[in-house]
Image (cartoon, rainbow, N blue to C red):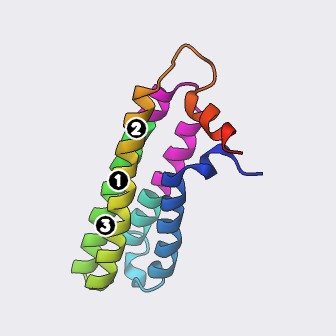
Amino acid sequence: MKLRYENLEIWQLAMELWKKWQLHRKKFPKEEKYKLTDQLDRSIEGILSTIVEGSAKRSNREFGRYLDISRGSTLESRNHFTLSYHKGYISEQELKELGALLEKIFFKEVAFQKWLFKNDSSDSRASSVSRRLESQK
């Protein structure tokens, strides 16, 4: 059984990013373990975690606020990968690929947040996104 957030494209894309990061992190030097590597771990996991946490909220408006936080983590991750490129830990091609995925996540977060705010019914206990995901089963 899939949980509701697992049906969200933004969560699936963020999970794809996390998996790609797990392959890249092995190439980073040990001296970055508690610096850039740790920051990338936290920012990428932050994207996933805030989407999951937001999906559990009772209204679309509340969920949308969590997407603000998730977008911040998305941009933070992009910046960390840019730093990684300039430090020589990833190639220009890897930066382009990771950057394209992060950009896709960012704009999907923006679009989904707009949808959530447009379809907010704060007075109901179950958000319309939850009802929408339930109907997809």
| Residue 42 numbered tag | none
Alpha carbons under labels 2 and 3: distance apart:
24 Å
Alpha carbons under labels 2 and 1: distance apart:
11 Å
Which quadrant, please, contains the C terminus? top right
Q: Where is residue 89 in the image (x, y as percent from the top left)?
A: 32, 84
Apparent side of residue 121 relative to residue 105 in the rendered image (left or right): right
Query: Which quarter of the picture shows residue 44?
Result: bottom left
Q: Name the residue under label 2.
A: 113
Nearer to us of marks 1 and 3 is 1
User: What amino acid does circle 1 point to?
Assistant: Phe
User: What amino acid does circle 2 point to?
Assistant: Gln
Alpha carbons under labels 1 and 3: distance apart:
15 Å
Apparent side of residue 69 relative to residue 60 in the rendered image (left or right): left
Q: Quick check: 132 above or below 105? A: above
Q: Which residue is drawn at 60% across and 46% down?
A: 5
User: What amino acid does circle 3 point to?
Assistant: His
Give, as a single range, the part of the protein colored magenta.
45-65
Residue 49 magenta = yes
Q: Tag 3, which secondary structure?
A: helix
Residue 81 magenta = no
Query: Which quarter of the picture shows residue 92?
Result: bottom left
Q: Position of residue 3 (x, y in %)?
A: 69, 47
Q: Where is residue 101 in the image (x, y as percent from the top left)?
A: 38, 66
